[in-house]
Amino acid sequence: MRNIILVFILVAILIPAALHAAFEYESILKADIGTPILDVTTNPAEDMVFILTPGTVLIYSVGDQTILDRIPVEKQFDRIAYQDKDRLVLTSRDPSTITILKFSRIYDIDLSGRAVKGNRDAKVTLVVFDDYQ
């Protein structure tokens, strides 16, 4: 009986300590959008945040803390979700609609001081990175 009482006392002492959990946190994004935010989603890499506002999807860079682009959409949409392969799913309750947008990220590459073949102002630029060792 004495052993059972000791076990209960030990359990009573140790359980509250085991149940206490602490979290560390830091703010990685803080922005004043300036318009009502209806919904938010991120890409799997979590480097971009997609913010649905009335009539616009804002693509926000977490690292640069800037808006990368704006996608105009109908004002009826009130929910947004990220889907595989760079797709955004927009839905609305009234009227009950769904739209899936496919987007591609375009990167600017500085070609100043580089060898260029063809028109420098071409709409498409092919860049080859080679290592001749």
Image (cartoon, rainbow, N blue to C red):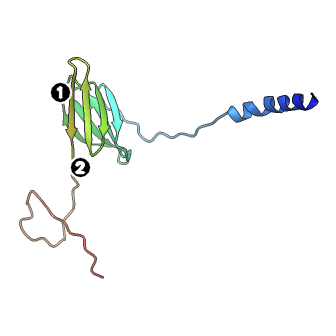
Query: Where residue 43 sits in the image (x, y, percent)?
Result: 34, 43
CA separation, marks 1 and 2?
22 Å
Q: What is the quadrant of the N terminus in the image?
A: top right
- Rendered view: 104 above or below 50: below
Q: Which residue appears farthest toward the right when viewing the image?
A: 2
Q: What is the quadrant of the C terminus in the image?
A: bottom left
Mark 2: few/some/many CA within 10 Å (<14, 14-19, 20+): few
Q: Quadrant of residue 74?
A: top left
Drawn side of residue 18 relative to residue 51, left or right: right
- Rendered view: 109 above or below 64: below
Total labels: the figure holds: 2
**Residue position for label 1:** 74
Residue at left 35%, top 48%?
64
Q: Is residue 89 visible?
A: yes
Nearer to the camera, 64 or 88: 88
Drawn side of residue 74 relative to residue 83, left or right: left
Drawn side of residue 81 relative to residue 113, left or right: right
User: Which amino acid, mark 2?
Assistant: Arg
Residue at left 23%, top 49%?
105
**Residue position for label 2:** 105
Query: Where residue 58 sits in the image (x, y, percent)?
Result: 26, 36
Q: Which residue appears farthest toward the front when viewing the image?
A: 1
- Rendered view: 108 above or below 12: below
Which badge, 1 or 2, is on the more N-terminal residue?
A: 1
Q: Quadrant of residue 122?
A: bottom left
Q: Indicate the secondary structure of the residue bearing disc 2.
A: loop
Residue at left 68%, top 32%?
19
Drawn side of residue 103 relative to residue 61, left or right: left
User: Which amino acid, mark 1?
Assistant: Glu
Q: Which residue appears farthest toward the top when viewing the image?
A: 94
